[in-house]
Image (cartoon, grey):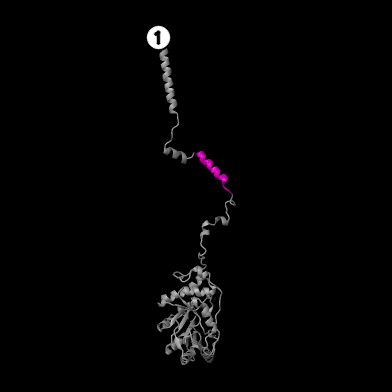
Amino acid sequence: MSKKNSLLLVIFLLAAVLVALLVFAKTMGNDEPTEPSESQQASTDTTPSSGATEATQESTADTTPSSEATTPSSEATQPETQATIPETQPSKPTEPTSPGVEFGTLYTRAELEAMDTTEHGYGPGNTSDGKRPPYAQSDQKKFGKYGGNFIAPDDNNVYLTFDCGYEYYATDENGNKYRNTEHILNTLKEKDVKAVFFVTGQFVREQPDLVQRMIDEGHAIGNHSNRHPVMPQQSIDRMVEEVMTLHNYVLDKFGYEMTLFRPPTGAFSIQSLAVVQNLGYKNVHWSFAYYDYEPADQPTTAKAYETITGRHHSGAIYLLHAVSTSNAAVLGQAIDFFRAEGYNLELFR
């Protein structure tokens, strides 16, 4: 081979080596890592491999505590928000009030719940010679601000009231049955006297015609509760229900709105008086009452007249039971006596 040819071969080989080096360098540059796209990142972050998923499941199985460990104490499960309940939050009613019953706005529930629930029995005591019973006057001063009426003002008036828990069917001398309350209404109409009739739920449902007659003839219908419970022994909601169930019934059936309430048995507490007052009612007790409420054990007419007239006094609120045949028999004479003594027979309002 000539020197010239040898030189050309060397140059060719060097060029080939240089080209090979350039190609290698370019290939190595393309193998450098690049930033993945946003979609590639998301796919990589949220889609673990099946191996990773299995590992997570194993980890969960290994760390699941026993049933005892997962049962927290009652203290731990109480929500923190309970601590923010104000002290005046009303307690949950133990007995629901009737639908549509209004609670009243004079006192709040918290104020009523804080009131004295001591139960007081009531009897004004006997009196004579026209003297006003001291016990009735004392209770009037103590409880008048809660809507209690134990005796009326000393204004020379007498007020007749009748309790109508149920109707009594009496028998006349000829053996004919008649309703005792009807006899009383006849006498009041004859004497032109208006009275308050305190009715229960039983009476108004069984004797609607007598209730309507009372209204038509200008008497007042008073609320004696729906079922005649001892009021201070009831919850606030039950007291409201007892008053308003009968209130709404009478309003619906007769279009008459009652405003006077007589507590069954006369028992009361400051709280029970205030609950009734909160409903827009006056509590009406009495300054005269006597043993007249057992139809099978009635006083003689002479004894009834002597008792009713013997304890007369100014501002007297008379409680008479409409089941008493003795009361019905002497009522006209008693009215004549009151008028002769200078009393006015007025309707309690």
Magenta segment's dominant SS is helix
- Local SS, label 1: helix
Report if residue 59 is visible in the image.
Answer: yes
Instruction: State the image coordinates of residue 90 (x, y, percent, origin top left).
Output: 50, 65
54 magenta-colored:
yes
**Who's the residue at 47% across and 75% down the image?**
277
Name the quadrant containing residue 344. Answer: bottom left
Instruction: State the image coordinates of residue 117 (x, y, percent, origin top left).
Output: 55, 73
Nearest the viewer among 205 and 338 is 338
Q: Tell me the amino acid under the disc marked 1.
A: Asn
Report if residue 265 is visible in the image.
Answer: no
Label tally: 1
**Who's the residue at 40% across and 9% down the image?**
5
The span shown in magenta is 49-65
Instruction: State the image coordinates of residue 268 (x, y, percent, origin top left).
Output: 53, 76
Q: Quadrant of the C terminus?
A: bottom left
Instruction: State the image coordinates of residue 216 (x, y, percent, origin top left).
Output: 40, 83
Pointer 1 residue:
5
Horizontally, is 88 left or right of 256 in the view?
right
315 magenta-colored:
no
